Image (spheres, helix red, strand yellow):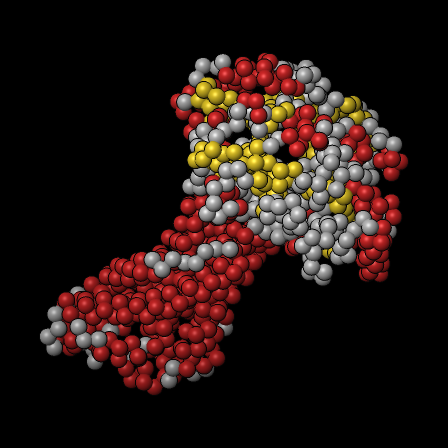
Amino acid sequence: MDIRPILSTLRRHKITALLLVLEIALTCAIVCNAVFLISQRLQRTEMASGVVEHELLQVTVANIGKPADAKARAQEDLALLRRIPGVTAAALVNQVPFTNSSSNTSIKLDPAQKLPTLNATMYMGEGLIKTYGARLVAGRDFNADEYMDYDNMRADPNLQSKVGSVVITQALAQRLWPGQSALGKNIYLGDTSVRVIGVMQALIRPSLFMGDDAAQWTMVFPLRLSAASASRYVLRTAPGQRESVLDGAAKLLRKADPHRIILHKKSLDDIRSDFFQNDRAMAGILVGVIVALLVVTALGIVGLASFWVAQRRRQIGVRRALGATRRNILNYFQTENFLLATIGIALGMVLAYGINLFLMLHYELPRLPAVYFPVGAVVLWLIGQLAVLGPAMRAAAVPPVVATRSV
Amino acid sequence: MLAYYLDLALRSLRRNKVLTTLMVLALALGIGATITTLTVLRLLSGDPLPQKSAQLFYPQIDPNTKDGYVPGQTKPDELMTYPDAMNLLKAHHGTHQAAMALTQAKIMPKQANAHPFFSDAVMTTSDFFAMFDVPFQYGGGWSASDDESKAQVVVIAGFLNDKLFGGANSVGRVIRIGDHDLRIVGVLKPWAPQPRFYSQNLGGRSYGDGDAAFLPLQTARAMEMGPQDTECYAAVPDIQHLETAPCEWLGFWVQLDSDEAVAGYKSFLDGYVKQQVALGRFQRTETSLLDLMGYLRQEQVVPDDVRLQAGLAFGFLLICVVNTVGLLLAKCLRRSQEIGVRRALGATRKEIFRQFMVEAGMVGLAGGVLGLGLAELGLFGIRHQPAEYASLAHLDLSMFALTFVVALVASLVAGILPAWRACVLAPAPQLKAA
């Protein structure tokens, strides 16, 4: 189709054409970035934890006053919990993934180092790795005789040097010793050193306060906790039995020691869903904005195209009288819209890239992947064509006789 | 004349209902989104204590070691160690000053069938109440000598008083916290600054009902209540004795009533740090003394998400305005003949310009009314979001007024180009064409 007549018509309507181009460009820029933000948010909610989430339950308790024999209390509680039908493992731990409460420490690779290498989180609790179902990719889990009582260590700081071993995640191992095996290497916490005896595939930090890049910087220590030093009981059970086990566990714990409060009882699936609810809400808002934007833009195109059709009724009539078919008229308006949309999209891409650069600077966002540009272009072309279809069909329906009327 | 323009505008808008609806709808969507996000933004960046915030200051010093220190560039720490907080407290250099930390209080109701429960509590010193203008329903705070003598006293919030004592005057009665009996000396009126500025770095929530109980710092520590957040800057021999450990866990606020007092306090703070350096306790000399609003800006209390949403809403409004310009222009060019007739009958360019601006303004007002409805809808959506400030998102009178200001400004800006095009139109060719 010859586009020269279209161009010469558009030249006579510079401002309206420009406004349409501008609107498409702005929409393109915002929609590209908003879709990218949505994908980032949704990707974040999929973050791997390294634990068997569908099988885990957490019950948190709080003691009123000090338990008489905290170590015995913990062992008794765990024995009771393990006896609940359906429970395959139970542990008393200091922290649980996605609960936002964490204990962290800075570590060094060399005691003489002035500044710490990085800050990692510290998991502890007898049988934690097995209960969490964290998968070991190298080395081994702790032996039963490796565990020390955390309470004893707290009372006597000299015992700290006796801990000796640690299990870390693959991500932390890679960060500390890139390309090497971590097994047998030493990590320094203050002045004491611990040797890496096992490497887990993954175990996420309970809180992502240090950013998502540090999410997997995790260490597990062979320390046994007591009812005085920990409050989180973690149970592993089949997914179908979670409800009944959770209720049973809470009742059992309260009955075993009435001097405590059951603070929370939740499945890890629910805990995870709460942890990422802000991301999901933000993604929802962005979807709403994108839909509203596309609707407004489409309506704008409908409005302007209708105006143009109405304004050119006589011109259309003349063309029809001179032999143009309905299809020719339809194509004319469709091509015109395609041209404007293309200019708008090209401008919009540049703008989208600019907005992305700004967001990268201020919100630590990655670069917009190139795939968004062609997809964004196709979407806007489609919307433009859909929006112009109605007015263009009305134009095609203009009878040639119009040309002869009211000069 | 305005009445005539209004009449003309109404007629013109009625003539093309679809186009008018499109304009109003698009503008309303943009305005609705903008007002919704602006309401949230204002809520989050608001002043928690408007009558007092200019006099409240947050001193910061830095007890960290020399490692990683860049003189002049390293920012001082957010929290304070116990010895430093006590030194500043005892220096009495401000009108009021208080040290504070957040904790969890286990409260045991006396009623037979009631379960014990945990509440947010503040461990602080006596000036807290006077400094933050905390309003009392019954009784009052405790004295500085109560701080020293570890008096077994407590101030409770109104909502805790309602829960435990049915709202009666409970001053003088006893409440069991942990395994200690504390005498109630004061009951607060509802008091919950939003955001809860004093808890920003103490590990607490920023929004919500506020804290339930306030205990003298020394009393709470003697009861082995611990702070929510502790930051240690050196190897810790004994984490139980936080008072002597190299750990920061206290927030410190001071009230300074004049510019001279602020300057005086800053030099006092610098002097204190130099003295600590001379004593060998400190290695870094940076200090900071921000006022309340400056402190909140430094802490970036407004989440990134909210700022992003506000930016998005403004982008949206911009697109809606461009859309309105296009549609208004289309409408006005279609009326070239009418304009020609009006000009030929003696209307000046100014009058034509005014007529079209009035029309744009009417579109704006209609968009504003509809936008207000959409903003209410948006805020209803925000209130059902998981954020902790969600329940506070309401449209107040000033945002109500702002809606119409935004609507009018947006529509008038959109109307300028079409109105200008209309008024420069030469009347003769239009009349001929007709």
Q: How many marks?
A: 0
Q: For residue A155, which quarter of the picture?
A: top right
B189 or A195, which lies in front? Answer: A195
Residue B35 in sight here: no
**Relative to residue A263, is residue A14 drawn left or right?**
left
Q: Residue at x 63, y 24 (%)?
A: A149
B67 or A91, which lies in front? Answer: B67
**Relative to residue A2, is residue B213 drawn left or right?**
right
Identify the residue at the far right of this view: B145
B313 or B339, which lies in front? Answer: B313
Q: Residue at x 12, y 70 (%)?
A: A325
Q: For residue B19, which quarter of the picture?
A: bottom left
B12 or A217, which lies in front? Answer: A217
Q: Is residue B110 above or below residue B49?
A: above
Q: For residue A144, which quarter of the picture?
A: top right
Q: Residue at x 73, y 25 (%)?
A: B177
Identify the residue at the far left of this view: A323
**Relative to residue B404, is residue A383 drawn left or right?**
left
Q: Position of residue A10 (x, y in %)?
A: 29, 76
Q: Is residue B406 above or below residue A251?
A: below
Q: Is residue B422 above or below residue A198?
A: below
Residue B55 in sight here: yes
Q: Position of residue B207 (x, y in %)?
A: 62, 42
Q: Is residue B381 above or below residue A291?
A: above
**Relative to residue A188, is residue B420 drawn left or right?**
left
Q: Position of residue B149 (x, y in %)?
A: 87, 32
Quadrant location of the C terminus of chain B?
bottom left
